[in-house]
C-alpha cells in the first residue's frame, strides 16, 4: 500500500464528499451565469452544463434561479414549445455586470491558488 | 414520448403531493416548471417509447420524496417557515383591518352621538393605537410560539428520502388533510378574544365623550360575565385542539371526536345564551336611560338573528362532522 492510498483511507468518504461539495458549490454561481448569457430553460441549462463537465440537480438549479430572479439577476419568460410551456432564463444587465465581476475575481483567485498548490 | 393513462395519473399524484409542500408564493409557477422539467427529462430518457405505469413509478422513485424536493424552495424570512410566514402576513392584515375598521366605526359613532371634542378625538386615536398594537403583539406571540414548537419538519409528514416510496403517493386528494389557514385564523382570533376578555374588559362597553367629560357605560350584565369562564374553557380547549391538529396535520379518530365535542360545547353555550335572552345578557334599561334606546331595539333583533344562525350553523357543522367521521378514512390509534 502506498503512502497516498493509506492517507486516503484515513479520510472518510463523508469528509471528502463535504469538501468536494463545498468546492463545487463555490463555482456554482459562475458556472450557471456563464451559460445564462444566452437564453436557456432549466433542463437545457442542466444538460449543457453536464456536457461541459459540471453536473447539478434540478433541485439546486430552480430554487437558485428563483432567488436570482427576485434579486433581478436573471429575467425569465414562459414560452410555449412542443405543446408544453418552458420557462426561459437569461442574465439581466445587472446579472451580466455581476457575472463579469465574479469572473474577474475567480480568475484572480484561480491564479493565486494555482501558484499556491504548484 | 407518450405517457400511458396510468403513468399520467402517477405523475399527477406526485405533482399533487409536491404542491402541498411548496411555498405558497409562486407555488403554481414552481409546479409548472418542475412538470416541464420532468417531461423534458422523460422525453430524453425514453424517446419515442411509451412511458407506462412501471417506468413512471421507477422514474418518480428516483425523483425522491416530494417533501425533500420542495424543501429546496423554502427559505426562512422570519423565525417561522415560509408557509407559516405567509399565514402570518395574511392573518395580521385581516385581523388588523377588521379590528381597525370596527374600532373606528364604533368610536366614530360614539363621538357623533356624544359630540366631537378635541379630547374625544385624541382618546379615539389613543384607543385605536393601543388596540392595534396589542392585537399585532398577540398575533406575533401566537406565531412565534407556533414557529418555536412546530419547526419546519414538524409541518411535514414523515416522508423522508430514505423511507419514501412512490407507492405512498395517495390516489385521492388527501382526504384527511386539515385546513391549516382556518386553524391558524381560529387560534389568532381565540387568543385575541381571551386577551380582550381578560385584560381589556373595560373596553367592552360604550365610551361616551361629551362636554361633561368621559363616561363609560357598561353593556353586559353580571349574568353575561358569569358565563365568561365557560367561554374561556371553550377557547382554551379550542387552542389545545388547534395546536395538536397543527402539529399532527392529520385527522385521527380521537381528534375527530374531540372536534365534535368542541362543536357540541359551542352549540350548548349558544343555546344557553339564547335561553338567558337579550335582557339577561345586555343592560337594556341602563342603556335606554343613557339614550341608547334605539340601539337597544335594533340589537335585540340582531341578537335573535345571530343566535338562531349560530344554532343552525352549529347543528349543520355537527352533522357535517358526523358524516365526515363515517365517510373519510381516519387512523385508529
Image: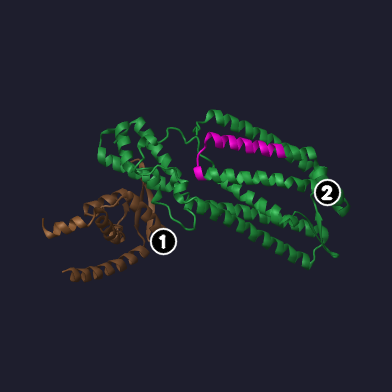
Residue B148 can be seen in this image: yes
Mark number displayed over residue B283: 2
Q: Chain of mark 1?
A: A
Helix, strand or loop at mark 1: loop
Residue at image coords 40%, 57%: A67
Q: Which mark is residue A71?
A: 1
- Who is closer to the viewer here, B254 or A32? B254
Q: Nearer the viewer, residue A52 or B70?
A: B70
**Quadrant in which residue B48 is drawn:** top left
- Tag 2: Cα neighbours inside 10 Å, few (<14), some, or many (≥20)? some
Q: Quadrant of the N terminus of chain A?
A: bottom left
Provide residue A58's location: percent of width, then percent of height: 33, 49
User: With A25 as the anchor, is B329 left or right in this view?
Assistant: right
- Mark 2 vs mark 1: tell me if same chain: no
x and y, in percent, of residue B123 in the image: 74, 64
Which residue is at a point 13% across and 60% down the rendered structure image? A3
**Which chain's colour is brown?**
A
Left or right, B267 with respect to B140, comes to right
Magenta stretch bounds: B247-269
Q: Position of residue B199 (x, y in %)?
A: 70, 56
Q: Could you tell me how far apart the alpha carbons at marks 2 and 1 are, in whole angstroms?
A: 59 Å
* Quarter of the figure that contains the C terminus of chain A: bottom left
Frontmost of labels 2 and 1 is: 2
Say which colour chain B has: green
Amino acid at each position: 500500500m502506498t503512502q497516498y492510498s493509506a492517507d486516503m483511507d484515513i479520510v472518510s468518504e463523508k469528509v471528502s464528499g463535504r469538501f468536494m461539495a463545498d468546492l463545487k458549490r463555490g463555482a456554482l454561481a459562475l458556472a450557471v451565469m456563464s451559460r445564462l448569457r444566452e437564453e436557456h430553460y432549466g433542463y437545457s441549462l442542466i444538460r449543457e452544463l453536464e456536457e461541459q463537465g459540471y453536473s447539478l440537480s434540478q433541485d439546486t438549479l430552480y430554487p437558485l434561479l428563483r432567488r436570482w430572479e427576485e434579486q433581478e439577476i436573471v429575467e425569465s419568460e414562459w414560452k410555449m414549445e412542443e405543446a408544453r410551456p418552458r420557462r426561459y432564463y437569461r442574465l439581466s444587465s445587472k446579472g451580466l455586470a455581476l457575472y463579469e465581476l465574479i469572473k474577474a475575481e475567480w480568475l484572480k483567485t484561480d491564479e493565486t491558488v494555482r501558484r499556491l498548490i504548484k | 414520448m407518450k405517457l400511458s393513462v396510468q403513468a399520467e395519473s402517477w405523475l399527477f399524484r406526485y405533482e399533487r403531493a409536491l404542491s402541498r409542500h411548496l411555498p405558497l408564493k409562486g407555488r403554481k409557477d414552481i409546479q409548472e416548471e418542475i412538470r416541464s422539467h420532468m417531461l423534458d427529462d422523460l422525453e430524453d430518457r425514453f424517446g419515442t417509447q411509451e412511458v407506462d405505469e412501471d417506468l413512471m413509478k421507477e422514474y418518480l422513485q428516483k425523483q425522491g420524496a416530494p417533501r425533500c424536493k420542495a424543501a429546496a424552495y423554502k427559505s426562512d424570512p422570519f423565525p417561522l417557515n415560509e408557509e407559516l410566514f405567509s399565514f402570518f402576513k395574511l392573518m395580521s392584515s385581516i385581523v388588523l383591518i377588521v379590528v381597525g375598521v370596527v374600532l373606528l366605526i364604533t368610536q366614530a359613532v360614539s363621538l357623533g352621538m356624544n359630540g366631537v371634542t378635541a379630547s374625544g378625538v385624541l382618546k379615539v386615536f389613543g384607543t385605536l393605537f393601543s388596540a392595534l398594537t396589542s392585537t399585532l403583539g398577540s398575533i406575533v406571540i401566537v406565531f412565534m410560539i407556533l414557529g418555536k414548537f412546530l419547526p419546519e419538519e414538524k409541518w411535514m409528514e414523515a416522508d423522508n428520502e430514505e423511507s419514501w416510496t412512490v407507492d405512498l403517493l395517495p390516489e385521492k386528494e388527501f382526504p384527511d388533510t386539515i385546513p391549516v389557514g382556518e386553524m391558524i385564523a381560529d387560534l389568532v382570533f381565540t387568543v385575541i378574544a381571551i386577551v380582550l376578555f381578560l385584560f381589556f374588559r373595560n373596553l367592552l362597553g360604550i365610551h361616551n365623550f361629551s362636554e361633561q367629560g368621559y363616561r363609560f357605560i357598561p353593556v353586559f350584565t353580571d349574568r353575561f360575565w358569569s358565563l365568561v369562564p365557560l367561554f374561556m374553557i371553550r377557547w382554551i380547549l379550542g387552542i389545545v385542539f388547534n395546536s395538536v391538529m397543527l402539529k399532527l396535520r392529520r385527522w385521527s379518530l380521537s381528534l375527530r371526536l374531540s372536534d365534535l365535542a368542541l362543536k357540541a360545547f359551542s352549540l350548548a353555550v349558544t343555546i344557553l345564551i339564547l335561553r338567558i335572552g337579550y335582557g339577561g345578557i345586555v343592560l337594556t334599561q341602563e342603556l335606554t336611560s343613557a339614550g341608547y334606546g334605539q340601539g337597544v331595539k335594533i340589537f335585540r333583533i340582531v341578537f335573535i338573528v345571530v343566535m338562531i344562525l349560530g344554532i343552525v350553523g352549529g347543528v349543520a357543522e355537527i352533522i357535517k362532522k358526523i358524516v365526515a367521521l363515517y365517510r373519510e378514512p381516519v387512523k385508529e390509534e
